[in-house]
Image (tube, rainbow, N blue to C red):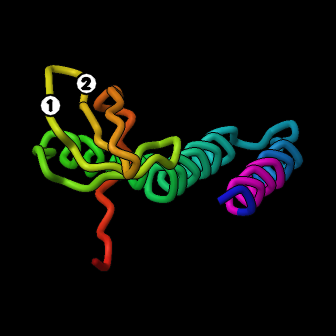
């Protein structure tokens, strides 16, 4: 993803440099260069939207759906990498039972996903 961001920023810099170098001289119409600038910015926004903003929103919606569908008995993994089985769920916390038999309470948003084991 960082290579993509670097590529987009490089294209932005190159595009702005080209548009700056295409400044109208005396007697030329500024409307054409303004239209190119607006088109360039719209294309750039479209690229950011479809490659950065939209996938991030999709991941957030999937995470919210996962968190809302949690139920006791589910095997989950936390953001910190702790594996456990849900014992109970309260408003914004989850009680997990880990392998040693101990129980820990974590915030609901600390659940990274469900963990399927091959028992």
The residue located at (30%, 46%) in the rendering is: 63
Q: Is residue 85 magenta?
A: no
For residue 58, side relative to residue 74 (left or right): right
Q: Residues within 10 Å of mark 1 (few under 14, many from 20)?
A: some
**Which portion, as a residue range, is magenta?**
4-14
Q: What is the C-alpha distance between the residues marked 2 and 1?
A: 6 Å
Decide: marks 2, 1 in contact (CB < 8 A)? Answer: yes
Residue lying farthest front?
A: 101
Residue lying farthest bottom?
A: 118
**Residue for badge 1:** 89
| Image quarter (top left, top right, bottom left or bottom right) of the N terminus | bottom right
For residue 81, side relative to residue 68 (left or right): right
Residue 105 is labelled as: none
Q: Position of residue 24 (x, y in %)?
A: 81, 42
- The local secondary structure at tag 2 comes to strand
For residue 46, side relative to residue 107 (left or right): right
- The local secondary structure at tag 1 comes to strand
Q: Residues within 10 Å of mark 2 (few under 14, many from 20)?
A: some
Quadrant assignment, res 92: top left
The residue located at (63%, 50%) in the rendering is: 36
The residue located at (44%, 57%) in the rendering is: 50
Question: From the viewer's perspective, is residue 92 above or below residue 19?
Answer: above
Q: Position of residue 40 (x, y in %)?
A: 61, 51
Q: Is residue 6 magenta?
A: yes
Q: Main secondary structure of the magenta part?
A: helix
Q: Position of residue 108 (x, y in %)?
A: 28, 31
The residue located at (25%, 24%) in the rendering is: 93
**Residue for badge 2:** 93
Image mark count = 2
């Amino acid at each position: 993803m960082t290579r993509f961001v670097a590529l987009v920023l490089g294209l932005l810099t190159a595009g702005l440099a080209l548009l700056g170098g295409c400044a109208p001289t005396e007697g030329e119409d500024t409307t054409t260069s303004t239209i190119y600038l607006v088109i360039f910015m719209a294309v750039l926004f479209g690229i950011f939207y479809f490659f950065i903003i939209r996938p991030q929103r999709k991941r957030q919606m999937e995470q919210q759906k996962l968190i809302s569908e949690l139920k006791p008995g589910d095997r989950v993994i936390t953001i910190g990498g702790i594996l456990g089985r849900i014992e109970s769920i309260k408003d914004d916390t989850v009680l997990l039972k880990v392998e040693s038999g101990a129980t820990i309470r974590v915030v609901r948003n600390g659940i990274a996903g469900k963990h399927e084991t091959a028992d």
